[in-house]
Image (cartoon, rainbow, N blue to C red):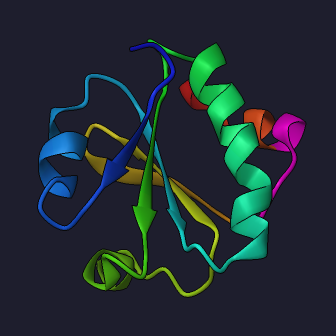
Amino acid sequence: MAGAITNLTDSTFDEEIGSATGPVLVDFWAEWCGPCKMIAPILEEIADEQAGTLSIAKVNVDDAPSLAQRFGVMSIPTLILFDGGEPAKRLVGAKGKPQLLEELAEFI
């Protein structure tokens, strides 16, 4: 299933991130967040283009507030790149595709 975006919950987060074979970009978002909706199609494009290199996952902060608290997510969208199961980079706010790819270049 190339380019699929995984939805993570409290119960699946640690297992999915811990067992990932490559970097995982996690999008902390919410239904009511305008900027989150703006970057959603960009993340889908990146998921397709970087399939096999970079995985993309989403965490709905309304459904999993404990995950947002655990990783200090104060505003959304917040993108946290996990590498080897550990947070390696944090991006806050909506960004365009070229800027996102530039920020992620060292991992892809």
Q: Is residue 93 something that shows in the picture?
A: no
Q: Residue at x 30, y 51 (%)?
A: 86
Q: Is residue 102 left or right of residue 86?
A: right
Q: Which residues are magenta?
A: 94-99
Q: Is residue 67 left or right of residue 93?
A: left
Residue 14 on the magenta segment? no
Q: Percent x, y for residue 53?
A: 48, 16
Q: Identify the image quadrant of residue 46.
A: top right
Q: Is 47 situated above or below 13?
A: above
Residue 97 on the magenta segment? yes
Q: Residue at x 26, y 22 (%)?
A: 21
Quadrant showing the C terminus: top right
| Outermost residue, front side | 31
Q: Is residue 52 left or right of residue 108?
A: left
Q: Is residue 106 something that shows in the picture?
A: yes
- From the viewer's side, name the closer residue of 50 and 83: 50
Q: Percent x, y for residue 41?
A: 73, 41
Q: Identify the image quadrant of residue 99.
A: top right
Q: Percent x, y for residue 82?
A: 39, 46
Quadrant showing the N terminus: top left
Q: Residue at x 83, y 38 (%)?
A: 97
Q: Identify the image quadrant of residue 74.
A: bottom right
Q: Percent x, y for residue 92?
A: 68, 68
Q: Residue at x 65, y 80 (%)?
A: 32
